[in-house]
Image: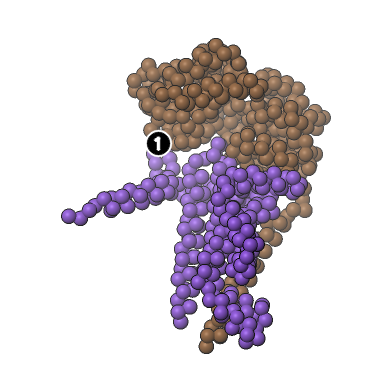
Chain colours: A brown, B purple
Amino acid sequence: MKTSSFASSTARTLTVFLAFFAFGLMLTLTSGCGQSKPVLYFYTWEDYIDPLVVEDFEKQFNCTVHLDTFESNEDMLAKIRTGSVPYDVILPTTYTVEIMRDEQLIQKLDPAQLPNVHQYADKVLAEKNGDANFEYCVPYYDGITGLGVLVDECDPLPDSWTVYGGENEKYQKRIALLDDMRETIGAALITLGYDINTTDDAQLEEAKNLVIKWRENIAKFGVDDIKQDLNSGANYIIHGYGGDIMQMSAEDPNIRFVIPKEGAIVNIDNFVIPTNAKNPQLAYQFINFMCDPKNAGRNMEYTKFEVPIAGAADAVSEETRAIPGFIVPAEVRAKVQVIKNLDEEGVKKFTKIWDEIKAAD
Amino acid sequence: MKNRIPQITTLFVFLFFYFPLVWMVIQSFLGKVDGEYEWTLRWYEQVFRKREVLSAVMNTVVVGFFAAVISTVLGTLSALAIFKYRGKIQEVHTALLYIPLVVPEILMGLSLMIFFSGLGLPFGKGTVIAAHVAFCTSYVTVVIASSLDGFDFTLVEASRDLGATYFQTFRKVIFPLLRPAICAGALLAFTLSLDDFIVTFFVSGHGGTTLPVYIYNSLKHGKVPGLYALSSVLLAVTFLLVTVSVFFQKNEFLDKEK
């Protein structure tokens, strides 16, 4: 009796095991098919490109785009430095492009392969970006960091960084700053009328004291949590990335994006081709395809971030163009500043004052 | 007079444990229409229409499956070895097995990353599975070893005396007796693999992005409610697995008593 029950239970386990194994094998096989087409490995930010544009590219060039995402430039850099993960196209922010260029992680771009870039890309922004001739990178998304405000709680609408100064009692502990060293110290430097890439001790000291003063009036430093707090009405004013706030205002007209009058920081994410790219040919085709004004416009529509390609904004729907802050006036655009990579000494200074700000009570 | 402190403490502990999770699940069903909140499934729809999410789900399942199978086989064998051959070498073996349980995960992730890149292996599913096997094996061994503590080895000797080969003894005596522990170990390994973030983060590359890594990578620009939706699904699957494993083990014990 016992033996038979043992035998049957063994058989049952073996069946279950085999069924599982077959299931796993099936999964592996199905995920492995379709690999005969050329594959473009694209390393980018989440939700940062219109999937339909990617599909069009796949159809037109008969390839597959494999998309991986990173959470920060630093995470991406750590992965790329191992040399074990060859990507064909990456989309890092300007200061990281500079690091990658200096460490020879990215290749020099061949202008002949990027006709759309040379025809349509914004040369003025490229110059601010530090690579006027698209030698190593192609600026693609530019997002201004500004204020996200609740219209019905803020009358008049704040238009200046001084809103963090605490003059309006109503905003006490109902406003928030980005938990980002360069952005927040940068906002203080702009308010004081300085360059955001300064390493002058006196200017940095002044900026530090200003942020410490702001700190007394804010609810907290945050990134995603403060977006949520704006959405729920817990905060009236937050410091945030333009695209993120405009995505929220597309759903809730009470949320509005405001660029402070003193100026603001613009973050530019750029296409680069890594040195160890497996398929640079396809990478060039991809970048060129994305810089076609029509495709650039679709990505602009999808992300609500501006794409500095001539004619792209014309391809955007009326509805999106009507979002306040979406079309940046030329005089505001002239005042934006780009975060540059600092030398070791500069990084130390910034880190030191940021630590002091965070530790201040 | 009844003392209410234990009850109140328990209540607070449960609130502390479960309120954030419940809150997240609720948020995943809330959306704004013209500034007003209403119940909606749109975050789930949006998230599961994305190709990257589907491939992350697929990667998680494939990695979890292979990590569980391989580490269960290795873990069972090493637990048996520890119990069968007692001696200096097995003492060292035991000590070595405990190390992955106590080494900080970040060290393990970093060292595996350096190791794999030193070997020139391309990062992807393979490296993630290998890394998961590296830590899951220890957990499986511990689970099986604890059930071997009460194991009656005379049954093995009896089987051998009666003429069974070693393989027959394993198949007909050892394996059925260890089955609950092996199943528990395998499910534990699968759950650990499913939930692991730190080690996976370091060694993933093309096609190795699992759900936790995907969720983390989406934090900067992704839509927050979409992440809540994804996390809620991960939570539901984890609970389901644990329930199944408990159910499974109960049934096993019933079988044994018959």
A327 in relation to A45, above or below: above
Judge by depth and name the residue closer to the eye, A36 or A221.
A221
Judge by depth and name the residue closer to the eye, B90 or B68.
B90
Q: Quadrant of residue B94?
A: bottom right
Name the residue rendered at 36%, 18% in the picture.
A168
Judge by depth and name the residue closer to the eye, A211 or A271.
A211
Could you tell me how many numbered marks the image carries? Answer: 1
Please, what is the three-letter code of the amino acid marked with disc 1? Ser
A262 in relation to B222, above or below: above
Residue highlighted by disc 1 = A232
Circle 1 SS class:
helix
Residue B196: % across, % down: 56, 51
Q: Chain of mark 1?
A: A
Name the residue rendered at 60%, 16% in the picture.
A199
Q: Residue furthest left?
A: B1
Residue B92: % across, % down: 63, 58
Name the residue rendered at 73%, 55% in the picture.
A34
Q: Is residue B122 left or right of residue B14?
A: right
Judge by depth and name the residue closer to the eye, A11 or A244.
A11
Residue A90: % across, % down: 69, 36
Res. B137 visible in picture: no
Residue B245: % across, % down: 49, 65
Q: Residue furthest front?
A: B88
